[in-house]
Image (cartoon, grey):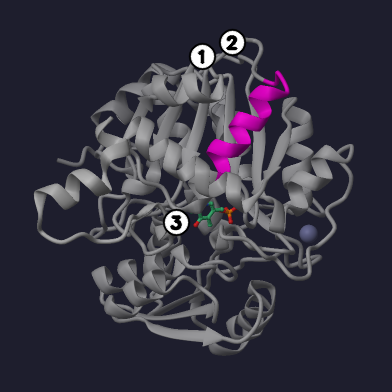
Amino acid sequence: MAITLERITPLRGLRCRACQVLQPADTRYICAECYGPVEPEYDLAASDANALREKIARGPHSLWRYADLLPVAEPASHFPVGWTPLVRAPRLGAAIGIANLFIKDDSRNPSLSFKDRPVAVALARALELGLDTIACASTGNLAGAVAAAAARNGLRAFVFVPATTDEGKIAGAAAYGATVVRVLGTYDQVNRLCARLADEEGWGFVNFTLRPYYAEGSKTILFECAEQLDWRLPDHVVVPVGSGALLTRTATAAAQLRQTGLVDDTPFRIHAAQPAGCAPVSDAVLDGYREVRPVRDPNTVARSLAIGAPADGDGSVGIIRASGGSAASVSDAEVQGACALLASTEGVLAEPAGGVVVAAAKALATRDVFDDNGSVVLYITGNGYKGTLDAGLLKPPIAADADEFRAAYAEVLG
Ligand SMILES: *Cc1c(COP(=O)(O)O)cnc(C)c1O
Ligand SMILES: [Zn+2]
């Protein structure tokens, strides 16, 4: 049952990241002064850590247990999004050389990716505003999350994806009843089309007009990790980077956890994981934390991370540097090998973005980035059961014959 207490950390307004002006949290989504990006800001000093911890512990088993640290209240009808397992991964850790390894298994959300988190918060805002249509530009997973949330709430949905998007992902979005628009072009071209439609159609575009709320939903993955570690930050987190919203809001979440006194101010390093075929953020970090240079033609099996011009790219580089973090970029072969390794050592079947994180963690371990022996959390953000996996591991079928089985599988039988 929901317990209604007064909000412990009141929302102060929306702060412009460019000109710093604080403005009311009305229907705006960009700064009225300079059109810069705005972010919700809270009155965190006013909070009482023990009261807040107790209130969270009594809350729902979903991301809405952190409603006091979010810009909108829990809507009446929603999926149980979030509150996913944080599990120790000793066998994977032994295989990639990390002693104190954890997996945050966010592949278990309702539409099988972490995108259900930002969409839950964006959708709550869309309902507050009385919108009847939500939309997005997507590399695959966001389409499913938007489509599912719209179906659950009786809203109309339009999702725009590059024509090369994994079919398993967009078939799901279509089954949820969304209008799936496949566009000939890269994600960045889809993005530009949608930025224009967002202005002209008046829909709730989760990653444009609702972006300040959408991005806040990404904070909840770190809130959960901290609570699951008995209110302590991990020493390291390895984050897959597409637009950079998840990485930058992981830092926002850590700052809020510290400011409210929910966790102590222990070292917390944020590392980026990207595929070599689209690594604008990792390349910038490894090249001395320089400015991000857009990648014109992303080419990777990790299509959910194929964003050549990330909206929060420079922000991500700055945050990684400030946290003392690093980055890695990994080849498609390493990604596929790492997906299989994660599945066979820990029983977690991830999409290629998960393989990017595992392979990047291995590369970081080789460079002694984790030699403090601290805890390392890998964000596994998408599920392998969406038609994104390499079928190359399969052997040809056999006749229904015991001898043929023994002959074909002699190697496995030993
Ligand atoms: C979108 C996505 C990401 C990256 O999220 P951003 O906030 O865009 O950086 C990571 N993993 C998966 C599976 C995704 O779908
Ligand atoms: Zn501004």
Does 11 appear above or below 280?
above
Does 25 appear above or below 175?
above
In the structure shown, which secondary structural element does the residue marked by tag 2 occupy? loop
- Quadrant containing ligand 2: bottom right
Residue lying furthest top in this view?
372
Q: Is residue 387 left or right of residue 154?
A: right
Amino acid at the residue labelled 3: Lys
Please tell me whether residue 364 belongs to the stretch shown in magenta.
yes
Residue identifier under label 2:
373
Q: In the rendered structure, are the residues bearing label 1 and label 3 in contact, judged by CB atoms less than 8 Å apart? A: no
Does 54 appear above or below 408?
above
Whichever of callouts 1 and 3 sits on the residue coming sooner in the sequence is 1
Q: Where's residue 308, x and y in %? A: 72, 64
The residue at 56%/19% (across/down) is 97
The residue at 32%/37% (across/down) is 411
Residue identifier under label 3:
115
Considering the whole magenta stretch, tell me its main secondary structure. helix
Q: Which of pointers 3 and 2 indicates the residue nearer the eye?
A: 2
Magenta range is 356-369
